[in-house]
Image (spheres, rainbow, N blue to C red):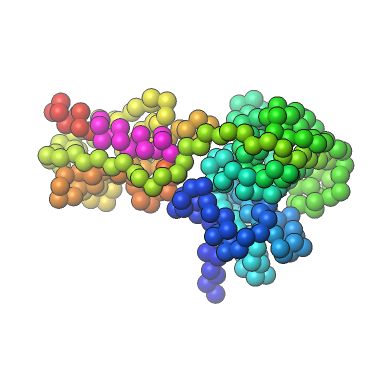
Amino acid sequence: MCQDFTKFYVEPRLMNLPMDLDALFTRSAPLFLEVGFGNGEFLIENALNRQGHNFLGIELSVISMVKIMKRLSRENIENVKVMMVDAKFGVRELFPDESVDGLYMNFPCPWPRERHSGKRLNTVDFLLSVAAVLKKGGMVQLYTDSLEFAEVFAENLGQTSCFIKIELIKNPPQVNTRYERKWKREGREIYKVTAEKLKTPMLRRIAGGDEMPHTWIKELKPENLKKILNSPIKKDIGVFVYKSMLKDLDDDRYLVETIAIDGDFQQHFYVEIHKRNKGWLVKLDSHGLPFRTPAVKKAVYELGKILEKRRGAL
Ligand SMILES: C[S@@+](CC[C@H](N)C(=O)[O-])C[C@H]1O[C@@H](n2cnc3c(N)ncnc32)[C@H](O)[C@@H]1O
Protein backbone atom coordinates (compact mmCIF):
# COMPACT_ATOMS: atom_id res chain seq x y z
CA MET A 1 0.00 0.00 0.00
CA CYS A 2 1.25 3.48 -0.87
CA GLN A 3 1.72 5.60 2.26
CA ASP A 4 1.17 9.34 2.22
CA PHE A 5 3.73 11.06 4.44
CA THR A 6 3.09 14.61 3.20
CA LYS A 7 0.91 15.24 6.25
CA PHE A 8 3.93 14.88 8.54
CA TYR A 9 6.85 16.12 6.48
CA VAL A 10 7.70 19.81 6.32
CA GLU A 11 9.91 21.05 3.48
CA PRO A 12 11.28 24.38 4.72
CA ARG A 13 13.18 25.03 1.46
CA LEU A 14 9.81 25.60 -0.21
CA MET A 15 8.35 27.86 2.45
CA ASN A 16 8.42 31.53 3.24
CA LEU A 17 10.87 31.98 6.09
CA PRO A 18 10.55 32.27 8.98
CA MET A 19 7.78 29.68 8.96
CA ASP A 20 4.18 30.39 9.91
CA LEU A 21 3.90 27.74 12.61
CA ASP A 22 0.16 28.03 13.32
CA ALA A 23 -0.54 27.55 9.60
CA LEU A 24 1.80 24.58 9.54
CA PHE A 25 -0.08 22.77 12.29
CA THR A 26 -3.45 24.29 11.31
CA ARG A 27 -3.94 25.19 14.94
CA SER A 28 -2.41 27.46 17.52
CA ALA A 29 -0.85 25.48 20.39
CA PRO A 30 2.39 25.49 22.39
CA LEU A 31 5.26 24.26 20.22
CA PHE A 32 8.11 21.98 21.31
CA LEU A 33 11.13 21.06 19.17
CA GLU A 34 13.30 17.98 19.37
CA VAL A 35 16.68 18.18 17.68
CA GLY A 36 18.10 14.85 16.44
CA PHE A 37 15.11 12.63 17.31
CA GLY A 38 16.76 9.42 16.03
CA ASN A 39 14.22 6.61 16.34
CA GLY A 40 11.60 9.11 17.48
CA GLU A 41 10.51 7.36 20.72
CA PHE A 42 10.77 10.54 22.82
CA LEU A 43 8.93 12.72 20.29
CA ILE A 44 6.10 10.26 19.87
CA GLU A 45 5.71 9.47 23.55
CA ASN A 46 5.46 13.18 24.33
CA ALA A 47 3.07 13.85 21.46
CA LEU A 48 0.75 11.06 22.64
CA ASN A 49 0.86 12.21 26.27
CA ARG A 50 0.43 15.89 25.45
CA GLN A 51 -2.18 16.06 22.71
CA GLY A 52 -2.70 19.80 23.29
CA HIS A 53 0.89 20.58 22.24
CA ASN A 54 2.50 20.70 18.79
CA PHE A 55 5.82 18.90 18.25
CA LEU A 56 8.37 19.42 15.53
CA GLY A 57 11.32 17.08 15.07
CA ILE A 58 14.53 18.05 13.27
CA GLU A 59 16.82 15.36 11.88
CA LEU A 60 19.58 14.88 9.33
CA SER A 61 19.14 11.14 8.87
CA VAL A 62 16.89 9.86 6.06
CA ILE A 63 16.47 6.52 7.86
CA SER A 64 15.18 8.27 11.01
CA MET A 65 12.86 10.37 8.88
CA VAL A 66 11.26 7.40 7.13
CA LYS A 67 11.03 5.38 10.32
CA ILE A 68 9.20 8.08 12.27
CA MET A 69 6.85 8.93 9.40
CA LYS A 70 5.81 5.28 9.12
CA ARG A 71 4.96 5.28 12.80
CA LEU A 72 3.17 8.65 12.69
CA SER A 73 1.10 7.39 9.79
CA ARG A 74 0.38 3.97 11.35
CA GLU A 75 -0.74 5.50 14.64
CA ASN A 76 -2.43 8.48 12.99
CA ILE A 77 -0.61 11.00 15.20
CA GLU A 78 -1.75 14.50 14.32
CA ASN A 79 0.40 16.79 16.47
CA VAL A 80 3.88 15.93 15.14
CA LYS A 81 5.71 17.27 12.09
CA VAL A 82 9.26 16.47 11.06
CA MET A 83 11.79 18.08 8.79
CA MET A 84 15.22 17.31 7.44
CA VAL A 85 17.59 20.14 8.11
CA ASP A 86 20.82 20.80 9.99
CA ALA A 87 19.67 22.09 13.38
CA LYS A 88 22.44 24.71 13.47
CA PHE A 89 20.94 26.35 10.40
CA GLY A 90 17.31 25.32 10.94
CA VAL A 91 16.81 26.62 14.47
CA ARG A 92 18.26 30.00 13.51
CA GLU A 93 16.64 30.44 10.12
CA LEU A 94 13.26 28.73 10.15
CA PHE A 95 11.59 29.90 13.32
CA PRO A 96 10.39 33.38 14.23
CA ASP A 97 11.75 34.94 17.41
CA GLU A 98 9.90 33.80 20.54
CA SER A 99 7.82 31.14 18.78
CA VAL A 100 8.91 27.95 20.57
CA ASP A 101 7.93 26.85 24.09
CA GLY A 102 10.65 24.27 24.61
CA LEU A 103 13.58 22.58 22.90
CA TYR A 104 14.78 19.06 23.68
CA MET A 105 18.02 17.40 22.68
CA ASN A 106 18.63 13.78 23.63
CA PHE A 107 22.12 12.38 23.24
CA PRO A 108 23.43 14.60 20.44
CA CYS A 109 26.73 13.42 18.96
CA PRO A 110 29.42 14.97 21.22
CA TRP A 111 31.96 15.21 18.33
CA PRO A 112 34.97 14.99 20.68
CA ARG A 113 37.61 15.43 17.95
CA GLU A 114 38.74 18.99 17.39
CA ARG A 115 38.39 18.76 13.62
CA HIS A 116 34.65 18.03 14.12
CA SER A 117 34.12 20.82 16.64
CA GLY A 118 32.09 22.81 14.07
CA LYS A 119 29.37 20.16 14.28
CA ARG A 120 28.81 20.39 18.04
CA LEU A 121 25.41 21.57 19.16
CA ASN A 122 26.64 23.18 22.38
CA THR A 123 28.33 26.30 20.99
CA VAL A 124 27.45 29.84 22.03
CA ASP A 125 26.23 30.52 18.46
CA PHE A 126 23.82 27.58 18.48
CA LEU A 127 22.57 28.44 21.96
CA LEU A 128 21.99 32.05 20.90
CA SER A 129 19.76 30.69 18.10
CA VAL A 130 17.92 28.58 20.69
CA ALA A 131 17.54 31.65 22.91
CA ALA A 132 16.16 33.70 20.02
CA VAL A 133 13.40 31.27 19.05
CA LEU A 134 12.32 30.30 22.58
CA LYS A 135 9.51 32.24 24.18
CA LYS A 136 10.38 34.06 27.41
CA GLY A 137 10.02 31.46 30.16
CA GLY A 138 10.55 28.67 27.59
CA MET A 139 12.91 25.83 28.46
CA VAL A 140 15.83 24.01 26.90
CA GLN A 141 16.65 20.46 28.00
CA LEU A 142 19.68 18.35 27.12
CA TYR A 143 20.35 14.68 27.94
CA THR A 144 23.84 13.36 27.25
CA ASP A 145 26.30 10.70 28.35
CA SER A 146 29.22 13.13 27.93
CA LEU A 147 30.01 15.14 31.04
CA GLU A 148 32.28 17.41 29.00
CA PHE A 149 29.52 18.13 26.46
CA ALA A 150 27.06 18.84 29.29
CA GLU A 151 29.49 21.16 31.08
CA VAL A 152 30.26 23.15 27.93
CA PHE A 153 26.52 23.30 27.13
CA ALA A 154 25.78 24.70 30.61
CA GLU A 155 28.69 27.12 30.50
CA ASN A 156 27.76 28.39 27.04
CA LEU A 157 24.11 28.83 28.06
CA GLY A 158 25.50 31.19 30.68
CA GLN A 159 27.76 32.90 28.13
CA THR A 160 24.73 33.92 26.05
CA SER A 161 23.35 35.89 29.04
CA CYS A 162 19.89 34.83 27.82
CA PHE A 163 19.12 32.00 30.26
CA ILE A 164 18.49 31.62 33.98
CA LYS A 165 18.12 28.61 36.29
CA ILE A 166 20.88 26.71 34.48
CA GLU A 167 21.17 23.29 36.13
CA LEU A 168 23.31 20.23 35.45
CA ILE A 169 22.33 17.01 37.21
CA LYS A 170 23.66 13.46 37.14
CA ASN A 171 21.50 10.39 36.48
CA PRO A 172 18.14 12.13 35.95
CA PRO A 173 14.79 10.36 35.34
CA GLN A 174 15.01 8.39 32.12
CA VAL A 175 13.87 9.61 28.69
CA ASN A 176 13.98 6.09 27.31
CA THR A 177 15.53 6.71 23.90
CA ARG A 178 17.63 4.20 21.97
CA TYR A 179 20.87 5.94 22.89
CA GLU A 180 19.94 6.30 26.54
CA ARG A 181 19.33 2.53 26.69
CA LYS A 182 22.60 1.88 24.86
CA TRP A 183 24.73 4.04 27.16
CA LYS A 184 23.04 2.68 30.29
CA ARG A 185 23.72 -0.89 29.13
CA GLU A 186 27.37 0.09 28.87
CA GLY A 187 27.25 1.43 32.43
CA ARG A 188 27.74 5.07 31.51
CA GLU A 189 26.47 7.96 33.64
CA ILE A 190 23.78 10.19 32.15
CA TYR A 191 23.66 13.99 32.56
CA LYS A 192 20.81 16.44 32.13
CA VAL A 193 21.10 20.19 31.62
CA THR A 194 18.06 22.47 31.81
CA ALA A 195 17.62 26.21 31.65
CA GLU A 196 14.90 28.82 31.34
CA LYS A 197 14.96 31.48 28.67
CA LEU A 198 15.06 35.03 29.99
CA LYS A 199 16.19 37.36 27.18
CA THR A 200 15.90 37.36 23.38
CA PRO A 201 19.18 38.14 21.60
CA MET A 202 19.37 39.96 18.27
CA LEU A 203 20.17 37.44 15.52
CA ARG A 204 21.33 38.03 11.98
CA ARG A 205 19.41 35.64 9.71
CA ILE A 206 20.43 34.98 6.12
CA ALA A 207 17.81 32.73 4.50
CA GLY A 208 14.48 33.78 3.07
CA GLY A 209 13.30 35.77 0.10
CA ASP A 210 12.00 33.95 -2.96
CA GLU A 211 14.06 35.76 -5.54
CA MET A 212 16.70 33.67 -7.30
CA PRO A 213 19.12 35.54 -9.50
CA HIS A 214 19.51 33.96 -12.88
CA THR A 215 21.55 35.41 -15.69
CA TRP A 216 21.47 35.22 -19.46
CA ILE A 217 24.45 34.65 -21.73
CA LYS A 218 23.47 35.82 -25.15
CA GLU A 219 25.08 35.29 -28.52
CA LEU A 220 27.09 32.27 -27.55
CA LYS A 221 27.30 29.37 -29.97
CA PRO A 222 26.91 25.87 -28.45
CA GLU A 223 30.38 24.86 -29.67
CA ASN A 224 31.88 27.90 -27.93
CA LEU A 225 30.10 27.16 -24.67
CA LYS A 226 31.52 23.64 -24.89
CA LYS A 227 35.00 25.12 -25.38
CA ILE A 228 34.54 27.36 -22.34
CA LEU A 229 33.30 24.53 -20.18
CA ASN A 230 36.08 22.21 -21.26
CA SER A 231 38.56 24.20 -19.23
CA PRO A 232 37.71 23.68 -15.57
CA ILE A 233 35.81 26.38 -13.74
CA LYS A 234 37.44 26.40 -10.37
CA LYS A 235 36.72 29.35 -8.23
CA ASP A 236 36.86 29.68 -4.50
CA ILE A 237 36.29 33.12 -3.09
CA GLY A 238 35.27 32.01 0.36
CA VAL A 239 31.55 31.71 -0.12
CA PHE A 240 31.33 29.17 -2.92
CA VAL A 241 33.34 26.62 -4.85
CA TYR A 242 32.59 25.31 -8.32
CA LYS A 243 33.67 21.70 -8.24
CA SER A 244 33.19 20.16 -11.64
CA MET A 245 31.15 20.48 -14.77
CA LEU A 246 28.79 17.75 -15.89
CA LYS A 247 27.13 17.64 -19.27
CA ASP A 248 23.55 16.58 -19.11
CA LEU A 249 21.70 14.34 -21.55
CA ASP A 250 22.01 16.59 -24.56
CA ASP A 251 24.06 19.52 -25.83
CA ASP A 252 21.51 22.01 -24.52
CA ARG A 253 22.05 21.56 -20.83
CA TYR A 254 25.10 21.57 -18.55
CA LEU A 255 25.37 21.24 -14.81
CA VAL A 256 28.09 22.75 -12.65
CA GLU A 257 28.58 21.07 -9.29
CA THR A 258 28.75 23.75 -6.61
CA ILE A 259 29.27 24.10 -2.88
CA ALA A 260 27.99 27.28 -1.25
CA ILE A 261 29.36 28.24 2.15
CA ASP A 262 27.48 30.57 4.45
CA GLY A 263 29.58 30.76 7.62
CA ASP A 264 29.42 27.28 9.15
CA PHE A 265 26.69 26.06 6.81
CA GLN A 266 27.57 24.32 3.52
CA GLN A 267 25.20 23.33 0.74
CA HIS A 268 25.96 21.13 -2.25
CA PHE A 269 23.91 21.63 -5.42
CA TYR A 270 24.11 22.23 -9.18
CA VAL A 271 23.89 25.34 -11.27
CA GLU A 272 22.33 24.71 -14.66
CA ILE A 273 23.26 26.30 -17.99
CA HIS A 274 20.33 25.73 -20.30
CA LYS A 275 19.80 26.77 -23.95
CA ARG A 276 16.64 28.75 -24.59
CA ASN A 277 15.50 30.89 -27.53
CA LYS A 278 16.97 34.05 -26.01
CA GLY A 279 20.39 32.51 -25.26
CA TRP A 280 21.80 30.46 -22.37
CA LEU A 281 20.02 30.72 -19.06
CA VAL A 282 22.19 30.25 -15.96
CA LYS A 283 20.03 29.23 -13.01
CA LEU A 284 19.72 26.99 -9.99
CA ASP A 285 19.14 23.40 -11.09
CA SER A 286 15.62 22.47 -10.11
CA HIS A 287 16.44 18.93 -8.98
CA GLY A 288 18.49 20.09 -6.01
CA LEU A 289 16.88 22.13 -3.31
CA PRO A 290 19.30 24.36 -1.43
CA PHE A 291 18.15 27.11 0.88
CA ARG A 292 18.44 30.35 -1.07
CA THR A 293 21.17 31.87 1.05
CA PRO A 294 23.44 34.74 -0.01
CA ALA A 295 26.22 32.27 -0.98
CA VAL A 296 23.84 30.24 -3.18
CA LYS A 297 22.61 33.35 -4.94
CA LYS A 298 26.15 34.60 -5.42
CA ALA A 299 27.28 31.26 -6.85
CA VAL A 300 24.59 31.40 -9.56
CA TYR A 301 25.23 35.03 -10.35
CA GLU A 302 29.03 34.68 -10.50
CA LEU A 303 28.90 31.69 -12.85
CA GLY A 304 27.01 33.88 -15.32
CA LYS A 305 29.68 36.54 -14.96
CA ILE A 306 32.51 34.04 -15.52
CA LEU A 307 30.88 32.65 -18.67
CA GLU A 308 30.29 36.15 -19.99
CA LYS A 309 33.94 37.05 -19.40
CA ARG A 310 35.23 33.90 -21.09
CA ARG A 311 32.89 34.45 -24.02
CA GLY A 312 34.43 37.91 -24.45
CA ALA A 313 37.92 36.36 -24.49
CA LEU A 314 37.15 33.84 -27.27
C1 LIG B 1 23.35 9.86 18.90
S1 LIG B 1 21.91 10.07 17.98
C2 LIG B 1 20.64 10.24 19.24
C3 LIG B 1 19.27 9.89 18.71
C4 LIG B 1 18.14 9.96 19.73
N1 LIG B 1 17.92 11.30 20.19
C5 LIG B 1 18.40 9.05 20.88
O1 LIG B 1 18.59 9.55 21.99
O2 LIG B 1 18.39 7.83 20.67
C6 LIG B 1 22.06 11.73 17.38
C7 LIG B 1 21.04 12.08 16.31
O3 LIG B 1 21.18 13.46 15.98
C8 LIG B 1 21.09 13.61 14.57
N2 LIG B 1 21.86 14.83 14.24
C9 LIG B 1 23.21 14.99 14.31
N3 LIG B 1 23.56 16.24 13.98
C10 LIG B 1 22.41 16.89 13.70
C11 LIG B 1 22.12 18.21 13.27
N4 LIG B 1 23.10 19.10 13.09
N5 LIG B 1 20.84 18.54 13.03
C12 LIG B 1 19.84 17.63 13.21
N6 LIG B 1 20.06 16.36 13.62
C13 LIG B 1 21.32 16.00 13.86
C14 LIG B 1 21.69 12.35 14.01
O4 LIG B 1 21.23 12.07 12.69
C15 LIG B 1 21.23 11.31 15.01
O5 LIG B 1 20.01 10.72 14.66
- Residue 213 lies, in percent from the top left, at 31, 41
Residue 226 vertical position relative to residue 155 in the rendered view, above or below: below
Say left or right for 25 vs 216. right
* In front of the other: 131 or 13: 131
Find out whether residue 295 is within the magenta segment. yes
Who's the residue at 80% across and 44% down the image? 183
Which quarter of the picture shows residue 170? top right
Above-or-below relation of 286 to 237:
below
Could you tell me which residue is drawn at 75 percent across and 61 percent down?
50
The span shown in magenta is 293-306
Residue 202 is situated, as x and y percent measured from the top left of the image, at 58, 33
Report the predominant secondary structure element of the magenta stretch. Answer: helix
Q: Nearer the viewer, residue 291 or 273?
A: 291
Quadrant location of the N terminus in the rendered image:
bottom right
**Of 136 and 261, the residue lying toward us:** 136
Q: Is residue 22 visible?
A: yes
- Please tell me which residue is depicted at 63% across the width and 29% down the height of the picture: 117
Q: Is residue 126 visible?
A: no
Taking the view exactly as shown, the residue that stands out farthest to the bottom is 1
Q: Residue at x 62, y 39 (%)?
A: 132
Quadrant of the rendered image containing residue 68: bottom right
